[in-house]
Image (spheres, helix red, strand yellow):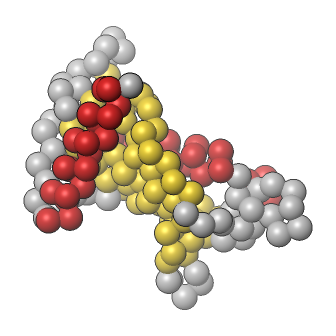
Amino acid sequence: MAFITSNVQIVLPQHCNGYAKPRLFGGQIMAWIDIVGAVAARRFTNSAVTTVCVDNLNFIAPAYLNDTIVQEARVTWTGRTSLEVRVDSFVEQLNGERALVNRAYAVFVALDDNDQPKAVPAYTPETEEEKAEYAAALERRKIRLGR
């Protein structure tokens, strides 16, 4: 089963726009995605990583001032030196219920001590959900390479 890396934040005033009902800036959640995604990639590769791209980023629902944001990152695919990480962001209610507000796929490259790309361990999906995610990652990679 895939190892999950998590991040938890409370949406504070500096994370929001100035509307009457302040909403979380998209750029702020993107920064948190990059961090938790990189931590998942670093843990998987046991090395430094750099972000190559955020391949797919979908804002599903808003988050507001004082919401608790829970993010879960997991590796979905590996290549020779790169890997894809899915990051799901949820608003968590005080009773523990969660609602998905954002899903993103980020691609990272593992780096050696000279900041050069290095081989990453192979990721082998085990569950049906992981196998489906892996197949979808291959399709996203094909689209990326075609650009």
Horizontal relation, residue 99 to residue 48: left or right = right
Residue at far bottom of view:
95
Location of the N terminus by quadrant is: bottom left
Choose top left, top right, bottom left or bottom right for residue 3. bottom left
Residue sitting nearer the eye, 100 or 1 = 100
Residue sitting nearer the eye, 14 or 57 = 57
Give x and y (percent) for residue 52.
Answer: 41, 28
Rendered residue at 55%/63% (across/down): 60
Rendered residue at 37%/36% (across/down): 107
The answer to whether residue 65 is visible is yes
Location of the C terminus by quadrant is: top left
Give x and y (percent) for residue 100.
Answer: 49, 69
Rendered residue at 15%/44% (across/down): 123
Against 123, residue 45 (above or below) is: above
Horizontal relation, residue 31 to residue 106: left or right = right
Horizontal relation, residue 32 to residue 5: left or right = right
Against 60, residue 43 (above or below) is: above
- Number of numbered markers: 0
Give x and y (percent) for residue 10.
Answer: 65, 65
The answer to whether residue 46 is visible is no
Choose top left, top right, bottom left or bottom right for residue 66. bottom right
Give x and y (percent) for residue 38.
Answer: 41, 40
Horizontal relation, residue 131 to residue 66: left or right = left
Rendered residue at 59%/61% (across/down): 9
